[in-house]
């Protein structure tokens, strides 16, 4: 049973009690991510996530780590395009200590310029690490294409140029402008006493002053593009995608089923056809990322330079085949069962359940029980999936980001455009 409580200052608490476990996962979710940023502040949401671990008025950075370790807990955080989350998993007997540490980090972090300068170097190395990962790079470049001039196109990590401008004053100003009880959710899943937990949150968060914050909802028209990035690599890495709808669209679950049967598993259409039958790639999969108002459907593939045309052509033929109704009842039902199975298995983790209820409340203002989600998946009809494919699998709308040795293979973009220009719907 999922329950919700709202404090007087606007903080929402969502709780799912699981009596048969001996742990609890707690998350502080703030509706602030890279889509809140502009050219000057890009990277600040993620940078603040790092800085909350660098010492408070009560605890030095090493003391935060030591206290969590001393109670056998796990403490971490992440930043996305739409939110930032600080979370902890502990034994049920250590919930009070966990909330004390989280709230101390959240309200009392020092943001000293010395620590800021050190962390700037750390995040710059993180950016370089991702740039050295071709799979991550092409996903980021596809996102930049899909979202164009919108803040949603910004890299979550920011840029080295921006990072070097971050100061104590800039960090504090950004937090004051964007962090508020009205855009914050605290979620917990596991074994806990509900009334005690609410009282504990009230103790630690009630003095946070309520205020409204501005939200940026800037969208830009999508224009397809083929973009190559030169890297001295032994393979070409490619990400093919299209802009799609947001989480609240009536076809959301139909899109999940389409993704699963097309490229979401080892039994999926493109894995079997491109990798297993033809041996054109080592890695290939499709994925869906849905946000509040939009999303991305993407296909990733890593291949040798000589396989580019055949691999891309095979992927596009499979897309075209599905558009023409080439889906069997067997793979359709297998895809639905796979989604349900993955979801039900995720319910065995308190961290996954805390994340699910926190994210849904924060971004979508909804509480969905497991039966609601299973029923929604069950209601998906094969015709619904084909309708989504008809719109999403238009070859003329697909964008491609790729990286490889463009100096050694200068004709890659021409080859890709040639394959995109071929006929597949006849």
Image: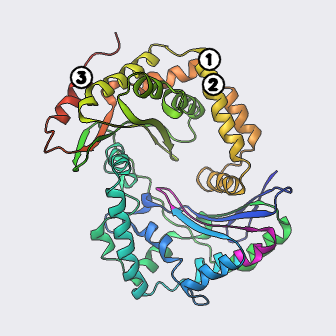
Residue 206 can be seen in this image: no
Residue 334's disc number: 2
Residue 87 lies in the magenta-colored region:
yes
Q: Is residue 161 left or right of residue 382?
A: left
- Which quadrant would residue 201 be assigned to in this image? bottom right
Q: Which mark is residue 156?
A: none
Q: Check disc 1: other Cα within 10 Å, few if <14, some if 14-19, many if 20+.
A: few
Would you say residue 158 sits in the magenta stretch?
A: no
Q: Quadrant of residue 223?
A: top left
- For the magenta stretch, what is the residue range? 79-98
Quote the CA–CA distance across marks 1 and 3: 32 Å
Q: Read off the residue under disc 1.
A: 330
Mark 1 / mark 3, whichever is N-terminal = 1
Is there CB contact under 8 Å for labels 1 and 2?
A: yes
Label 2 or label 3, whichever lies nearer to me, is 2
Q: Is residue 357 above or below residue 345?
A: below
Q: How far across and down, in percent of the image, does residue 134 sit?
A: 33, 49
Query: Residue placed at 49% from the left, 57% from the top?
Result: 80
Disc 2 and disc 3 in contact, CB within 8 angstroms = no
Residue at position x 34%, y 9% in the image: 426
Q: Which residue is mark 3?
A: 421
Is the image coloured rainbow, by chain, by secondary structure, or in one colour? rainbow
Query: Which structural element holds mark 3?
Result: loop
């Amino acid at each position: 049973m999922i329950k919700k409580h709202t404090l007087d200052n606007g903080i929402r608490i969502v709780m799912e009690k699981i009596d048969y476990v001996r742990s609890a996962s707690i998350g502080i979710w703030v509706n602030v991510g890279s889509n809140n940023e502009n050219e000057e502040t890009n990277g600040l949401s993620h940078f603040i996530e790092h800085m909350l671990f660098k010492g408070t008025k009560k605890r030095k950075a090493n003391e935060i780590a030591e206290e969590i370790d001393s109670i056998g807990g796990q403490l971490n955080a992440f930043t996305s395009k739409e939110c930032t989350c600080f979370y902890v998993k502990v034994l049920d007997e250590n919930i009070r200590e966990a909330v004390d540490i989280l709230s101390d980090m959240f309200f009392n972090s020092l943001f000293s310029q010395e620590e800021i300068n050190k962390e700037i170097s750390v995040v710059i190395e993180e950016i370089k690490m991702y740039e050295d990962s071709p799979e991550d790079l092409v996903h980021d470049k596809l996102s930049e294409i899909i979202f164009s001039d919108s803040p949603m196109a910004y890299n979550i990590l920011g840029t080295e140029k921006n990072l070097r401008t971050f100061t104590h004053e800039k960090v504090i100003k950004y937090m004051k402008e964007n962090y508020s009880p009205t855009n914050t959710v605290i979620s917990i899943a596991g074994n806990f006493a509900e009334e005690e937990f609410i009282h504990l949150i009230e103790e630690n968060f009630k003095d946070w002053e309520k205020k409204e914050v501005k939200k940026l909802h800037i969208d830009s028209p999508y224009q397809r593009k083929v973009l190559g990035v030169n890297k001295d690599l032994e393979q070409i890495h490619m990400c093919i995608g299209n802009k799609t709808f947001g989480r609240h669209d009536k076809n959301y679950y139909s899109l999940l089923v389409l993704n699963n049967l097309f490229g979401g598993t080892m039994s999926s259409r493109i894995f079997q056809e491109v990798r297993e039958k033809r041996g054109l790639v080592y890695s290939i999969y499709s994925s869906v990322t849905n946000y509040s108002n939009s999303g991305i459907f993407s296909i990733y593939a890593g291949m040798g330079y000589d396989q580019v045309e055949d691999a891309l052509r095979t992927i596009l033929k499979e897309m075209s085949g599905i558009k023409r109704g080439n889906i069997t009842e067997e793979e359709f039902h297998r895809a639905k069962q796979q989604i349900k199975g993955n979801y039900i298995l995720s319910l065995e983790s308190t961290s996954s359940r805390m994340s699910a209820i926190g994210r849904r409340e924060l971004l979508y203002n909804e509480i969905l029980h497991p039966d609601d989600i299973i029923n929604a998946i069950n209601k998906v009809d094969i015709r619904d999936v084909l309708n989504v494919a008809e719109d999403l699998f238009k070859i003329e709308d697909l964008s491609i980001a790729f990286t490889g040795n463009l100096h050694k293979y200068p004709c890659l973009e021409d080859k890709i455009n040639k394959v995109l220009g071929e006929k597949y719907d006849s």
